[in-house]
Structure formats: C-alpha cells, structure tokens
Image: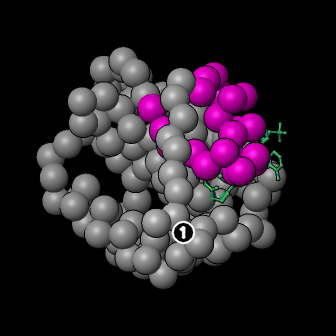
Amino acid sequence: MKFAIRSFKMEELDEILRVYESGFREITRNLKKDVENFRNELSQAISSDLPGNLLVAVSGDKIIGFASYVKKDHWHFGPIAVHPSKQRQDVGKSLLEECIRRMKSEGGGRVTLIVQKKNKEALSLYEKMGFRITSHVMEREL
Ligand SMILES: CC(C)(COP(=O)(O)OP(=O)(O)OC[C@H]1O[C@@H](n2cnc3c(N)ncnc32)[C@H](O)[C@@H]1OP(=O)(O)O)[C@@H](O)C(=O)NCCC(=O)NCCS
C-alpha cells in the first residue's frame, strides 16, 4: 500500500478523530470520554505555541493514521493510531520514524511516552524503535 506522511490540515480534525475512535475502540474502557479528551488536547495544542506537530498518514485521499508530539519540559510522543484495516503495513512505524526525525531536527533531547502494559502491539513497535521502559504507573479502582 502506498501512503504519504505529512502535517495535518485544520479541516482534517474530524477525520483524525474518527481514526482515533476506530484505532482505540478495542483497547480503551471509555472510548467516548477518551475521544472527547483527545479533541480537547488537540484544540489546546493547536492554539498553544509549544513546539510539536500532528502528522497524518494519507493513502489516496483518506487519512489512515496519525501521530503527535509536543515539547513541554521535554518531548512527549503520542497518541498514535492507525486505522484497523491498515494496520501491520508499516504505517505506525513510518509515522513514529517521521516524528523522531522532526523532534531531532527541532532540537532533539529526550522523548517519553505512556503505553498500557497490555498493549503488546504498541510496546513491540516502541521497543523496535529504541524506547526502553523506565517507570511503572500503578492504579486501582476506588
Ligand atoms: C500500535 C499501532 C499504531 C501500530 O501501527 P501499525 O501500522 O499496525 O504498525 P506497523 O505495521 O508499522 O508495525 C511496526 C511494528 O509494530 C509491532 N506491531 C504492530 N502490530 C502488531 C501486532 N498486531 N502484533 C504484534 N506486534 C505488532 C511490530 O513490532 C511491528 O514490526 P514488524 O511488522 O516488523 O513485526 C496500531 O496497532 C494501532 O493503531 N493500535 C491502536 C492504537 C494504539 O494502541 N496506539 C498506541 C497507544 S500507546
């Protein structure tokens, strides 16, 4: 499959949210709330002057994946998602590679991300791309 990676365009936000929804459907407990949080995060990120970007993977005229990165005290990567019908075709890897290339060219330093322990696909991708686990977050129901 042929695809290209580039920065998002403002008018693509709803399509990106749809890819988020389909990508995270299987792995999140509260999809509706997560989609809403992501929408708010995006609006904040777009209106702030923090360095960072939202990249999309495009095949034909369809957005098939996206990934974002932002610099606060250091670089933070994510979220990333690829439409389920387009997964396992190097789209996620290419998005992450391009984000890394851009973070390097925008000053480099350290990049962190958060991933659920049960998310084997993402863990495998990140490990392949040189990320190492440095901390554990613990939680319980109250
Ligand atoms: C994680 C995700 C972005 C990977 O995207 P993708 O386009 O399918 O990944 P790629 O085809 O580029 O694969 C790159 C590597 O990821 C790992 N990987 C991807 N899918 C996998 C799967 N189903 N099982 C095991 N490893 C997998 C492999 O290491 C793979 O390398 P390989 O093909 O050489 O084995 C995608 O599975 C996704 O959108 N998941 C839902 C959203 C999500 O979990 N986001 C991350 C939250 S932290």
What residue is rendered at 66% in x and 45% in y? 117
What residue is rendered at 61% in x and 49% in y? 116
* Residue 53, percent from left and from top: 35, 47
Q: Is residue 122 left or right of residue 37?
A: right
What residue is rendered at 66% in x and 65% in y? 27
Q: Is residue 60 visible?
A: no
Residue topped by disc 1: 20
Whether 89 is drawn above or below 103: the answer is below
* Residue 28, percent from left and from top: 60, 68
Q: Amino acid at mark 1?
A: Tyr
Depth order, front residue of 59/101:
101
* Residue 130, percent from left and from top: 63, 22
Whether 64 is drawn above or below 122: the answer is below
What residue is rendered at 39% in x and 38% in y? 76
- Does dot 1 land on a helix, a strand or a loop? helix
Q: Is residue 58 left or right of residue 26?
A: left
Q: Is residue 65 left or right of residue 13?
A: right
Mark 1 Cα-neighbour bin, 10 Å: few <14, some 14–19, many ≥20: many
* Residue 86, percent from left and from top: 75, 63
- Quarter of the image with the N terminus is bottom right
Q: Quadrant of residue 39?
A: bottom left
Depth order, front residue of 22/16:
22
Magenta stretch, residue numbers: 112-133
Q: Is residue 140 magenta?
A: no
Whether 95 is drawn above or below 42: the answer is above
Q: Is residue 41 visible?
A: yes
Q: How is the image coloured?
A: one colour
Depth order, front residue of 109/85:
109
